[in-house]
Amino acid sequence: EHATFLIEQKRAHYVLIVKKNQPSLYAQVKRLSWKQIPVQHRERDRGHGREERRTLKVVTVTTGLLFPHAVQAMQIKRQVRDGSTGRWRTVTVYAITDLPAWQAPPADLAAWIRGHWSIENRLHYVRDVTYAEDHSRVRTGNAPRAMASLRNLAIGALRLTGAGNIAQAIRHISRDATRTLTVLDLP
């Protein structure tokens, strides 16, 4: 429904990560002949005590993929080596897009997907870990949406003060109730 809305109503495009909560689509994308498709984009990063290698394979999908307007499918492999243990682990992620190859070359697709992960890490990770949103007992009516809005407001306010580590900023503020007023910029 979302993909159809974006394409038909908003005249927009999508790049969507295919997750296991969509078992039919996930199985279809995973079954594509990935072994025969060459790697079209590579990246390496070091930081935060780990080394990361990412590869991207892209294939044009003409028939058989049961998802509205899907034109390309992607396989992203991330190999991550923990600096303290030296062990490698591999994560494979699949994605789809309605954009044809001439509008979305592999390097652009990799950048867009990487950008999505940075948003995921910057906001959702903070909400999930720092605010323990997944463990919240607030589940009925409008309360979950209201609590999510309040969490987003708090995160946004702390980011505006220059806080890089939200958990550390919360601990600092919680030690003195008057510090909340400085975050809200109230006298």
Image (tube, rainbow, N blue to C red):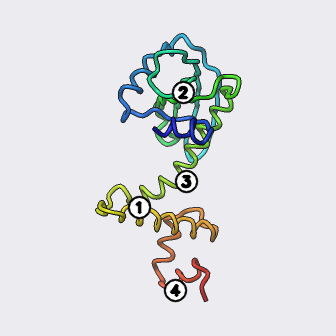
23 in relation to 50, above or below = above
Query: Is disc 2 placed on a helix, strand or loop?
Result: loop
Of labels 4 and 1, earlier in sequence is 1
Q: CA distance from mark 3 to mark 2?
A: 30 Å
Query: Is disc 1 placed on a helix, strand or loop?
Result: helix
Q: CA distance from mark 4 to mark 3?
A: 27 Å
Amino acid type at circle 1 is Arg
The residue that mark 3 highlights is 122
Foreground disc of the pair 3, 2 = 2
Is the C terminus in the top left, top right, bottom left or bottom right quadrant?
bottom right
Q: x and y percent of residue 17 in the render?
A: 49, 35
The residue that mark 1 highlights is 145
Circle 4/circle 3 CB separation < 8 Å: no
User: What label sits on residue 161 in the rendered view?
Assistant: none
Farthest residue to the front: give it. Answer: 9
Q: CA distance from mark 2 to mark 1?
A: 30 Å
Farthest residue to the top: give it. Answer: 36
Amino acid type at circle 3 is Arg
Foreground disc of the pair 3, 1 = 1
The residue that mark 4 highlights is 178
Q: Where on the picture, by quarter, is residue 106? A: top right
Q: Residues within 10 Å of mark 2 (few under 14, many from 20)?
A: some
User: What label sits on residue 69 in the rendered view?
Assistant: 2
Q: CA distance from mark 3 to mark 1?
A: 19 Å
Q: Residues within 10 Å of mark 3 (few under 14, many from 20)?
A: some
Amino acid type at circle 4 is Thr
86 in relation to 169, above or below = above
Q: x and y percent of residue 179 in the render?
A: 54, 82
Of labels 2 and 1, earlier in sequence is 2
Query: Is disc 3 placed on a helix, strand or loop?
Result: helix
